[in-house]
Structure formats: structure tokens, C-alpha cells
């Protein structure tokens, strides 16, 4: 009953002759794309589909709980959603609730904005031992992503090794060494906060396979860790004497800051982050669970094109630890029915136009964000990416409108007929209010609902 009423409520604002675009995925790339489409004078109608009942993707599930300022970008997405030509269909998954073919029948174009749902693997022995996990799973866990709530992370050992020197590595290191009291008023989940209170972790080793000039982190992210009370940042080994004149600004900032940190005498703080360059993971050691990580020292080799790679020296050592978190990048997952480049982990495209197996653009299919260009860049990077994708799509308007829609059935009705409980944006706003109220009661900005069933039940009860 509720489903049928909402289907009706959701289908009132459509006009038959406008360009109809479906966006799959409601993270920043999806919302920025919706914004550019809605700004066009041609009255484009935009439906955003999302696998989870909640919108905003990595703004909700990736950005760390102690970076609430960054999460405020969701206020801009809320404004976009107010446009009467915008609709949200949460809890709707391609492949589970409808096929891509069915979706395409009702839209002139589909934009894939699904991001990178999984992580890269190290490909070393012992990687699947209990206690060896992806940093992205740890992030999903403390941020309340429904897919990661059954995970547990062993925080009973003194040392955790994080592989990789990107900003995700900085986030997880910071969350692991930060005093849990400082997270108590954020939107970290209750379970994660309780686990961090019990944590015996005192040292996080960040392992970079290349040198200080190749770190993928931003200086400000490292500075956030160094500024934490009760935490020392220790740079292992001597930093190379580099002439920084020819390097890009971000590299210069990073290396200069590392030099500054290396010159600081440790304060004897109770928690430490050790940065270890020129070392790669070789094997995760342990019988029933992780006991240590075997690492290989590297040297740098410069190729003719100026790129710098790590090469193993054959010198190994063992680092005792209870938890290994690989933070070596996200990876896209194939969407049923859509082309996919398995090697690169993204949807093959030419300037956003999705390419089929024959290498030619597939009519009506576009990509944006990480699934288009790979998992790099900040939230704002998706704005220019979305602008490019929407510009490409709108320049195809004539050919898109020239192909009549194969189905006149509205998505809201189609899903209602199939018994799918689609979550509208108004539903999300009710969940949002509920989470904020739960948070207020606990002295936090928000207490997230962390499983899909609980979200749907809460909606049906309210
Ligand atoms: P990333 O920036 O690509 O960093 C990945 C790191 O893993 C690099 O240091 C890389 O070293 C290393 N690595 C890759 N493969 C490896 C291997 N096989 N063995 C050892 N090390 C390996 O990825 P990310 O940290 O997941 O971040 C993804 C994007 O999100 C980035 O653009 C990041 O800036 C952004 N982000 C931003 C924030 C923020 O602003 N607060 C927070 C989180 C994420 P090489 O360079 O040698 O390949």
C-alpha cells in the first residue's frame, strides 16, 4: 500500500517530451551530474537510483567521522534534490530489482555513477588470514556502511600495519591512534566507538613502497595526525637529500613537512604513527590469524619517461603486528549488463561515452566519477568530471531523443508492481531526522542506522 502511494507521489512531476535520464549511484559524481542536467534549459528529468536506502555514497560512508566539515557538502546535494524534476529511488539495485535493459527502456540515457565498490588486493601469501583486511572495509565499518557491519577488527595487539601512503591510509591511521573521546560526538557508529575504547593499539606503521617524494597523501592529512594530542609521528630512517626545485607543489609540501617531522624530537607520546618508506609487503604471517608481516626493502628505479618505480632488494625483515590493513586503492565492480574493463576495474569510456566490446560508444550509456576515471581525486574532482559527462550527454540530445522510449511505464510504478520498496528522498529525510534525533540523545551529531532492514522498518513504522 505504502509502495503504491509513493509510486503515485513520485510520478506527478514528469513531462512526456523532456529528456529522461537515469543516474545509477547517488554519491558526489551522481549528484553533481544531476545538478548539471537540471540546470540545462531543456527541462531534463532526472531519476537517481541507489542500491542502499541512503544517498551520498562516500560522503556518508568514506569521509572520516572526525571530518564533519567535509560531510557538509551533502547540504548542496539536499538542495539539488529539491528540484521538482529530480527523484530519488533508494534501495533499488540493478541486477536485483531491475535489469539494465528494463531501465534503458524507460530512459533516453543512463549515467553510471557507481564509484568503486571494492578494493585492490596485494596478491601476497597470507592476505586472507583473519586480521588481514582492506582499509576500505575498516572505513565502511566505522562509518556504518551496511555491507561491513558484520566485520570485526582485532584491536588487541599493540601494532597495526597499514599498507599504502594515500589519504585513506592517513584516515585509518588517525582513527586508530586518536583518543576515542575525541570521536564521541561524531557520527562514528556506536559499535566502532566501543571497540576503539577497548583498543590496545599503540602504534600504526604506515608502509610506503616508494619514497617520500612519491607519497600519495596530502600534507594537511598528515598534519592532522601530527597535531593530535598524545601522538608522535616518527619518520623511519633518513630522508633522501632531494633537490625539490623541479617537483610539483604538493610533493614539495609533503617532503618539506616530512623533514620538519623528522627533525622534531619524539615527545614520548603513548601512541605513535611510524612512517616507513621503501618497503613492500611480502607475506602476511600467522597460523590461525595475523601475527606479523614480512616486508621487503625496496630501492627506486627511474624509467626513461621519468616515472619512478619500487624494486625489491631481496632484503627482508619481519614486523610483528595483530592487524594488517591494505590501503592500496579502491577498485570498481562490474554492473550486470554494462561493459566493464576487468583489468582497470572501470567502465570503458571515451570522454564519458561508454564503449561496447567493439570499442564503439553504446547508445545512451555514459559514465562519471570513479567508475569512469578510476579511484582518485577528491569530492570536488567529481564536479568537473560530472560537467564533462553531462556536456557529452547533452551534446547527444538529438540522437537520444530520436530513439523513442521502448517503455512508457514510469519507474515508480514499475518498481511498485515488482514489490520493490523504493526509498524516496522524502523517506531519506525522515531517516535523516531519525538519525540526528538518535545522535542528539547520545550527545553525537548523528547515530546512523546501520542495516537496511532497520531503515525500512523505521520508515514503515513512522
Ligand atoms: P591512493 O591515493 O591511490 O593511494 C594508494 C597508495 O597505495 C599509494 O601510496 C600507492 O603507492 C600504494 N600502493 C598501491 N598498490 C600497492 C601495492 N601493491 N603495494 C604497496 N603499496 C601499494 O588511494 P587511497 O588512499 O585509497 O585514496 C583514493 C582517493 O581518495 C585519493 O584520490 C585520495 O586523495 C582520496 N581521499 C581523500 C581523502 C581526504 O581528502 N581526506 C580521504 C580519503 C581518500 P604507489 O604510489 O607506489 O602506487
Image: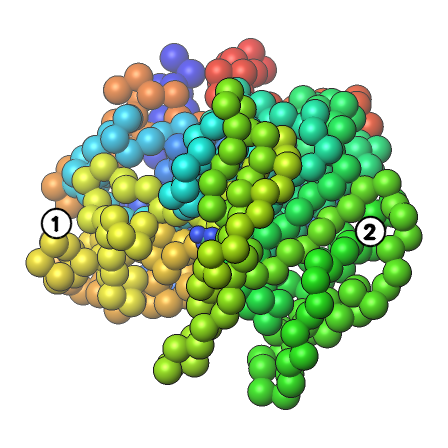
Q: Tell me the quarter of the picture where residue 60 sits.
A: top right
Q: Residues within 10 Å of mark 2 (few under 14, many from 20)?
A: many
Residue position marked by numbered label 1 in the rendering: 404
Q: Is residue 58 left or right of residue 352?
A: right
Task: Residue 439: give x, y in percent of width and height.
Answer: 74, 27
Give the colouring mode of the picture.
rainbow
Where disc 1 sits, the SS reads: loop
Judged from this view, the residue extending furthest toward the bottom is 245
Give the label on residue 232, or none.
2
Question: For this rendering, which residue is in front, 436 or 427?
Answer: 436
Q: Is residue 261 left or right of residue 354?
A: right
> Which residue is found at the position 21% from the left and 45% from the top?
338
Q: Is residue 91 left or right of residue 460?
A: left
How many labels, in total?
A: 2
> Which residue is found at the position 86% from the left and 64% from the top?
264
Give the label on residue 83, or none.
none
Question: For this rendering, which residue is in front, 301 or 195?
Answer: 301
Judged from this view, the residue extending furthest toward the front is 315
Residue 260 in view (yes/no):
yes
Which of disc 2 and disc 1 is earlier in sequence? Answer: 2
Judged from this view, the residue extending furthest toward the left is 358
> Which residue is found at the position 79% from the left and 33% from the top?
180
Task: Residue 358: give x, y in percent of width and height.
Answer: 8, 58
Task: Residue 120: give x, y in percent of width and height.
Answer: 41, 46
- Which-is-in-front pick, marks 1 and 2? 2
Q: Tell me the quarter of the picture where residue 352 sits.
A: bottom left
Q: Tell me the quarter of the picture where residue 155 sits.
A: top right
> Which residue is found at the position 19% from the left and 40% from the top?
337
Q: Are marks 1 and 2 in contact (CB under 8 Å)?
A: no
Q: Quarter of the image for the N terminus: give it.
A: top left
Q: Quarter of the image for the C terminus: give it.
A: top right
Task: Residue 207: give x, y in percent of width and height.
Answer: 59, 52
Amino acid at each position: 500500500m505504502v509502495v503504491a502511494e509513493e509510486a503515485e507521489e513520485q510520478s506527478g512531476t514528469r513531462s512526456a517530451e523532456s529528456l529522461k535520464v537515469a543516474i545509477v549511484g547517488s554519491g558526489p559524481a551522481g549528484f553533481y551530474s544531476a545538478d548539471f542536467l537540471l540546470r540545462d534549459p531543456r527541462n531534463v528529468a532526472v531519476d537517481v537510483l541507489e542500491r542502499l536506502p541512503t544517498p551520498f555514497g562516500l560522503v556518508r560512508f568514506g569521509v572520516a567521522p572526525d571530518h564533519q566539515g567535509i560531510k557538509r557538502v551533502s547540504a548542496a546535494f539536499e538542495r539539488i534534490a529539491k528540484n521538482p524534476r529530480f527523484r530519488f529511488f533508494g534501495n533499488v539495485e540493478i541486477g536485483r530489482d531491475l535489469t539494465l535493459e528494463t531501465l534503458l527502456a524507460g530512459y533516453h540515457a543512463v549515467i553510471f555513477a557507481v564509484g568503486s565498490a571494492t578494493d585492490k588486493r596485494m596478491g601476497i601469501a597470507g592476505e586472507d588470514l583473519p586480521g588481514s583486511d582492506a582499509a576500505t572495509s575498516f572505513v565502511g565499518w566505522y562509518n556504518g556502511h551496511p555491507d561491513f557491519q558484520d566485520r570485526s577488527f582485532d584491536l588487541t595487539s599493540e601494532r597495526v600495519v597499514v599498507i599504502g601512503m594515500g589519504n585513506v591510509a592517513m584516515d585509518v591511521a588517525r582513527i586508530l591512534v586518536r583518543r576515542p573521546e575525541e570521536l564521541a560526538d561524531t557520527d562514528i557508529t556506536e559499535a566502532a566507538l566501543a571497540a576503539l575504547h577497548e583498543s590496545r593499539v599503540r602504534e600504526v606503521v604506515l608502509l610506503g613502497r616508494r619514497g617520500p617524494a612519491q607519497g600519495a597523501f596530502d600534507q594537511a592529512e598528515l598534519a592532522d595526525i601530527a597535531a593530535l594530542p598524545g601522538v608522535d609521528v616518527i619518520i623511519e630512517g633518513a630522508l633522501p637529500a632531494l633537490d625539490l626545485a623541479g617537483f610539483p607543489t604538493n610533493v614539495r609540501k609533503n617532503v618539506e613537512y616530512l623533514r620538519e617531522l623528522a627533525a622534531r624530537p619524539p615527545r614520548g607520546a603513548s601512541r605513535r604513527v611510524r612512517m616507513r618508506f621503501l618497503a613492500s609487503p611480502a607475506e602476511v604471517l600467522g597460523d590461525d590469524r595475523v601475527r606479523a608481516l614480512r616486508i621487503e626493502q625496496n630501492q627506486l628505479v627511474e624509467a626513461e619517461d621519468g616515472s619512478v618505480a619500487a624494486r625489491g632488494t631481496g632484503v627482508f625483515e619481519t614486523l610483528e603486528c595483530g592487524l594488517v590493513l591494505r590501503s592500496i586503492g579502491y577498485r570498481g565492480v562490474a554492473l550486470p549488463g554494462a561493459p566493464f574493463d576487468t583489468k582497470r576495474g572501470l567502465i570503458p569510456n571515451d570522454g564519458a561515452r561508454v564503449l561496447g566490446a567493439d570499442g564503439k560508444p553504446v547508445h545512451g550509456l555514459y559514465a562519471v566519477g570513479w567508475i569512469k576515471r578510476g579511484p582518485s581525486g577528491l569530492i570536488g574532482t567529481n564536479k568537473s568530471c560530472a560537467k564533462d559527462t553531462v556536456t557529452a550527454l547533452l551534446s547527444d540530445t538529438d540522437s537520444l531523443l530520436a530513439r523513442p522510449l521502448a517503455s512508457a511505464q514510469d519507474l515508480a510504478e514499475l518498481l511498485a508492481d515488482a514489490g520493490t520498496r523504493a526509498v524516496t528522498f522524502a523517506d531519506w529525510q525522515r531517516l535523516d531526522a531519525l538519525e540526528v534525533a538518535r545522535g542528539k540523545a547520545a550527545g553525537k551529531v548523528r547515530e546512523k542506522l546501520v542495516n537496511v532492514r532497520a531503515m525500512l522498518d523505521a520508515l514503515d513504522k513512522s
